[in-house]
Every structure is written in structure tokens, then in C-alpha cells.
Image: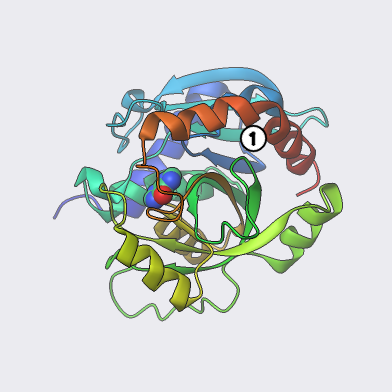
Amino acid sequence: MTKDAYTLAREAAAALRAATGLDSFDVALVMGSGWVPAADAIGSAVSETPFTGLPGFQAPAVAGHGGRIRVVRTAAGRHALVFLGRTHLYEGLGVDAVVHGVRTAAAAGARTIVLTNAAGGLRPETQSVGDPVLISDHINLTGANPITGTTFLDLTEVYSGRLRALAREIDPTLAEGIYVAFRGPTYETPAEIRMLRTLGGDLIGMSTVLEAVAAREAGLDVLGLSLVTNPGAGLSGEPLDHEEVLEVGRATAARMGVLLAKLVDRL
Ligand code: HPA
């Protein structure tokens, strides 16, 4: 029998402990494309390990998605695992690879995880490019699920209401929205974007939902944050471009960094 995904995550957590000399970590953050430039603000780096140096991790396929785990000491002395980059379902490596970081964070002792992403905005009437949005719930249209078998996990509150309230205390201007995930890697068609608006979605992206489910399975509290990097396809008349997504991240790094730094010590 091949080694199961949960065992592999425990091995990765043990390797992280050995690499850092730390026994446990308080919180984990997954930095999506557009969020990596904000990572420096979270705290001072204790160590940095490339994904390729840890069991079960894959080198990321996408430019701008990093591919390292940084251990950070926050202003209040907490230890955060900061994932600079993630594996996406569209890379074709399977669901377990997509959620391996989350399972590793849980095995390493984290009780809370912050999942960030870049997203297309489905509500340009009220959203602006460069806005951070708290994810209040999701619609998983990837066709995948990280759980196999008869674990009928309750998903009534995937994104912790308590953590969202805390985030709004830090930044009262934060809006909330429902994040829809497609598998990608293509961006959506304008007809799909119109469908998602009708379905009640506010944000569209290609990540986060599988990680959030795996995090809930592991008992982690989840906070989700999208950075609106563009209006959804067909809503602005402009074609979509990955480079533009990264540029919005660079332009908003200071604001997102302050938000994350304040959050990690209050979660
Ligand atoms: N669609 C899907 N994923 C995205 C988008 C989008 O418009 N923008 C950033 N990530």
C-alpha cells in the first residue's frame, strides 16, 4: 500500500520541526498569488525551507507562486508557518497534493490557518481592484473533494465567524463575499461569470476551497481572504492576464502586509 496522505503530512511536519528546532507552530498562512509581496510584514524570518526539501511537497508550476515555507516570529513572539506558494488542482498532481500544506500545518501544531488568494470580482458595482475581501462561505465547483470515504464533515461554518469578526475589528472597511472555485487553469467565459453572479457568488478563483475543507477536517479554524485583482471575465471589456494579477499584489503589498501582521497576533 502506498503511504497515506495523512502519514506523509506528519512526516513533513517532523521535517519542519527538525529544520527549525521548534516544537510547534501557532498559526499558518497560505500566501496566494498577489499576497507573496505582503509576506515580509508578518514578522521576522526564522528559517526558510524550499518545498522540494520536505516530504510530499511539489515545486509550484506557476511563476509568482513561490514554493517555500518560511517560519516567522511575529511581533508578539508567536511562530507562524508562512507558505509562499501553493499547489493548485489544475497542475494535475491530485487533491492530496493540493491540501498537503494544510495537513502539514495541522500536524505541526497550528490551530488556525489563514488562506489567501487572488480572485476575480463578480460584483464590480461594489468591489474595486485592490480590495481585500473576507470569505464568508464558498461554492466548490472544482468537482473535487479532499476527503474520501464516509467522513460526512459539517460545512455549515467553514470560515470562522469569530475570526471574521476579529478581522473586521482590525479593518472595519473589510467586505465579505462568497468565493467560487473552478478548477482552472483557464479563466472563465463571460457566460460562466454571469452564471456565477446568478448563483450568488462574489469572487471567483482556482484555489482555497479544497484547502479550507481539509483544514476543517483537521479541526483548524479558517480565515479566508481574497484580493480582488480584476473584474471577472466580460465585466470590464478587458482580457484577463496573470501578470496583472501579480501587479495588483505588488501594488497592494503594504496594505495587505499591515492587515496580516495585525491579524496573526490576534487570531
Ligand atoms: N478568475 C479565476 N481566478 C482568478 C481570477 C479570475 O478572474 N483572478 C485571479 N485569479
Q: Is residue 224 above or below residue 69?
A: below
Q: Is residue 128 left or right of residue 122?
A: right
Q: Residues within 10 Å of mark 1 (few under 14, many from 20)?
A: many
Q: Residue 187: percent from the left, percent from the top?
A: 31, 49
Q: Residue 114: percent from the left, percent from the top?
A: 60, 48
Would residue 146 be seen by someone viewing this image from the given angle?
A: no
Q: Which residue, given by chain and number where applicable, does mark 1 sit on?
A: 80
Task: Name the outermost residue toward the left.
Answer: 1
Q: Is residue 28 above or below residue 215?
A: above
Q: Is residue 94 left or right of residue 210?
A: left
Q: Residue at x 76, y 32 (%)?
A: 258
Q: Residue at x 29, y 29 (%)?
A: 59
Q: Residue at x 83, y 32 (%)?
A: 76
Q: Between 191 and 252, which is closer to the camera in this rendering? A: 191
Q: Between 257 and 80, which is closer to the camera in this rendering? A: 257
Q: Residue 124: percent from the left, percent from the top?
A: 57, 56
- Inspect the image, locate mark 1, and give the three-letter code of the amino acid beneath it: Ala
State the image quarter where residue 264 is shown.
Answer: top right
Would residue 82 be seen by someone viewing this image from the given angle?
A: yes
Q: Is residue 89 above or below residue 209?
A: above
